[in-house]
Image (tube, rainbow, N blue to C red):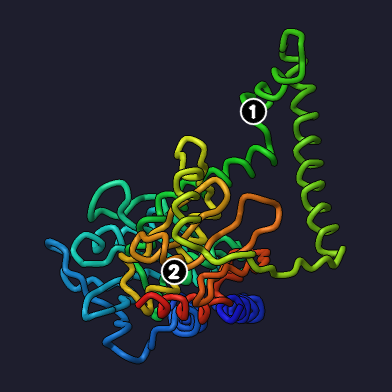
Amino acid sequence: MEFLEKLNALAAKIRQQGASIQTEEATKNAFVMPFINAVLGYDVFDPTEVIPEYVCDVGTKKGEKIDYAIMKGGEVQILIECKKIGEALNVNHASQLFRYFHVTNARISILTNGQVYKFFTDLDAPNKMDEKPFLELDLLDIDEHVVPELQKLTKSAFDVESIISSAGELKYVGQIKKEIAAQFASPSDEFVKFFAAKVYDGIITQKVRDQFGVLTRKATAQFLSDQVNERLKSAMSGVVLPSYTAEAPVSDAVTATETKAEQAEDLVVTSLDELEGFHIVKAIVRTVVDAKRIIHRDTQSYFGVLLDDNNRKPLCRLHFNRGQKYLGLFNKEKVETRHPIVSLDEIYGFSDQLKETVGYYD
């Protein structure tokens, strides 16, 4: 929650001061530097961590500068190009990032106007910055799904392997969400025809298509409203689901049985939430153990996170195959206690327990 509070504090500052910012330099001082310092945790006054006006010579272009380079281990990890707040961010604005990306060791580049942050990597071609971002953050409209991914870029939890491994998924999920939103707002002929064909038995003429255009807009609006109402009802009911403990510890015999019975791959479906939860756990635990030792295994009944790919070394279990999500944690006797969570961000609240679990096996 502390990380989200930092984002919200910066968002409040933008709301208060954004209208008075008139230049790119003022944008950097008022909003971008606090983002690098307070949110990501890098010391903007330490040149071994943050280099402003970083010079990247490319071919015949000498002395051109990128606004910020974030360093780790003596190497450039993140490049940041800034524009004035309120200015639109597009590919044309990222020309310097494109040029500099392939001449540094950076795998992440950021284009920002102080309010909106667009994150790029090299998914499409090695060492060449993609034209489309894999992650977008709008501080005045924070998407809770972005927060765990953003935390991977912080100084304390920087994990470029985890970021890159999930970047492709994030990129396409984000684009699909935008397309869904666009279709809900203004359904295309193909979208309308798809649903009309599902519920209308007659020939779909232009007149029918026009009628279903109106009906589709109404249906999608009502669907979204129903989803919101269901969440409100759930929140207002005040029902608090208690934590509960498994009846028996994880024994070798039980583990072996579960492995045989539950890991039939054709019956296991790994969800996006499970993968995101795994990356959060990995970002936490990698501070006390090599990230390569943290492995996941999905089963029909739970998503397991293991040390050394060993069923006898469970770090936690994600029980996400139901309406209420649970995070399963283990004690020294390998007895599991399940904790109800609402958002994936709550996993960070169990960081100490997860790190302690590693100590049971090492």
Q: Quadrant of the N terminus?
A: bottom right
Q: Nearer the viewer, residue 40 or 302?
A: 302
The local crowd at label 1, few if under 14, some if 14 to 19, many if 20 or more residues have their Cα within 10 Å, is some
The local crowd at label 2, few if under 14, some if 14 to 19, many if 20 or more residues have their Cα within 10 Å, is many
Amino acid type, mark 2: Lys
- Which residue is under mark 2? 83
Q: Tell me the residue at 46%/56% (across/down).
A: 253
Instruction: Look at the numbered disc 1 and give the secondary structure of its residue.
Output: helix
- Which residue is under mark 1? 191
- Is residue 129 depicted above or below 150 in this figure? above
Q: Position of residue 97 (x, y in %)?
A: 31, 62
Along the horizontal axis of the image, is 286 left or right of 226? left
Work out which residue is located at the far front of the displayed protein and give it: 253
Q: Position of residue 120 (x, y in %)?
A: 38, 58
Work out which residue is located at the far top of the displayed protein and give it: 203
Amino acid type, mark 1: Phe
Determine which of the numbered discs, if any, sits on residue 284 in the image.
Answer: none
Q: Tell me the residue at 28%/79% (across/down).
A: 72
